[in-house]
Image (spheres, coloured by chain):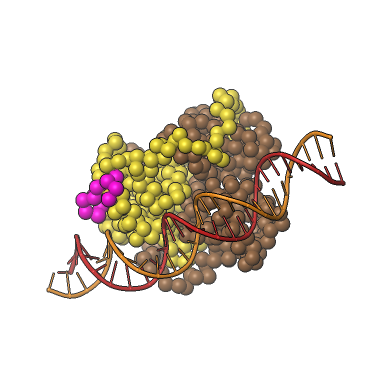
Chain colours: A yellow, B brown, C orange, D red
Amino acid sequence: MTQRNRGEEIHGSDRPDDYCYRVLSGAARCYIVLPSGRRHIMDLLLPGDFFAFAPCGGHYCGVDALADNTVVACFPCDVVKACASADPAIAARVREMALGATARMQQLILILGRTTAREKVGSFLLAITERTSSSGADRVVLPTSRYDIADYLALSVETVSRSLTELKQRGSIALAGPRRVRIVDRHELGERDQLESDCLVSRATPRHPPEGDPGERDVRLMANQ
Amino acid sequence: MTQRNRGEEIHGSDRPDDYCYRVLSGAARCYIVLPSGRRHIMDLLLPGDFFAFAPCGGHYCGVDALADNTVVACFPCDVVKACASADPAIAARVREMALGATARMQQLILILGRTTAREKVGSFLLAITERTSSSGADRVVLPTSRYDIADYLALSVETVSRSLTELKQRGSIALAGPRRVRIVDRHELGERDQLESDCLVSRATPRHPPEGDPGERDVRLMANQ
DNA sequence: CGTATCATTGAGCTTAGTCAAAAAGTGTGG
DNA sequence: CCACACTTTTTGACTAAGCTCAATGATACG
């Protein structure tokens, strides 16, 4: 757990699943370098956030500081596992933090699944705003450069930049410098989906409403081999 | 936990984070319906696989059977949580299964991050082959239709179909019926990255080799608020 | 005050989405 | 076993969107 400044590597390895990370202050990016040289940012970590790489076949994985004075706690996963086995309170904490990581991953999957670059950038802005200011604030200072946004959203830098200027010109956001963003129209940034909700639902129609509690409580089914 | 046939809904709700799922036999898809009507498949579940939705702002979430005689155990998350708190063995099992879910999510993020449709489809084929036959087999029966693949990879059906025929024509795969695939050239299906590994690494160069064990073992840093 | 990095903008090209239709499977009942 | 309907898959033509290459501004840092 060392303090690092912007751009400095916190930890890196090609055995990524040996360590897990928790940001204590600052911000960090977790990325994988594909053998082609492409970098994909798997997660952005703000204070309190937890992350662990899954084994990923020989790719180089790393965690870098995004801000000055970033402090990240790095732990060998097997140590954490052992502590969790020994102490139920720690186990519960680990579960809770892993749940947060899962939520961010699912959110990223959803964002990456969007069709247009504008939607991706828009929902990224909404997500990062939500995370930095817990309430429904409308101002955010991006912790990332355009390059990082591009590698996070799987877009080119140019497309990220163009999307932002387009959103600005539409009046959906306002920019004060490259990193200071004000959200003007949330709906235009991906909740826009909501507005079209009365449109035709083709191959995704929910067939029946939820049928009440399945009533199955035999946790052995969940837990046994 | 009821047995369902292909296409039937197993569970659905717009409070997705209340339940978690474990496939006992068959196969299932976990998806989110965006208000626009678009469906995104968040995960494909094979026997033994575990999944839980994160809260996702009012979208409809569902789990459907992909095969006949699919059996899925559905549990309220708070019940599982309570059992994990009470029984360390269950807690460990839940951790282990959640780790598997995390690995699949990270893999999906990586696949969605690929640039071309052919790469997405190719790495999807590799991934699903790896999961269905634990060793390095080269044959796979896809559990999904083209539509499902499309909704999983965030592509259009037509593009999925075109990518598959293109891979076939290149000799990277062989098709026997729409769902029976034989992997001919693994490298062409996404490990292709490996071949270009000596190419220029631009903005993703790992700065230093891993610096040895950070040596931090104070798990309080991991566990405390 | 240069220099390097980051951000923006432009032009051309490649690729995937859309709309439309045909072909190939799948399952049913006669 | 065949005929029929229905679904799934494939293919084509066109359009739109993002990537690449290239150049220009802006900003921070020595």
Relative to the observer, which residue lies in front, A165 or B210? A165
| As drawn, B187 above or below A205 | below
Q: Quadrant of residue B184?
A: bottom right
Q: Quadrant of the C terminus of chain A?
A: top right
**Is there any visible trace of residue B61 in the rendered image?**
yes
Relative to the observer, which residue lies in front, A23 or A43? A43
| As drawn, D5 above or below A117 | above
Residue at image x 65%, y 30%? B2
Q: Quadrant of residue B27?
A: top right
**Is there any visible trace of residue B98 in the rendered image?**
no
| As drawn, B28 above or below A153 | above
Residue at image x 52%, y 37%? A201
Task: Judge whether residue A178 is colored magenta.
Answer: yes
B116 to the left or right of D23: right
Residue A221 placed where, x, y %? Answer: 62, 33
Residue A77 placed where, x, y %? Answer: 46, 49
Residue B10 placed where, x, y %? Answer: 60, 33
Residue A52 placed where, x, y %? Answer: 44, 49
Tell me the magenta residue range: A169-181
B142 to the left or right of B192: right
A203 to the left or right of A170: right
Residue at image x 66%, y 34%? B4
| As drawn, A55 above or below B206 | above
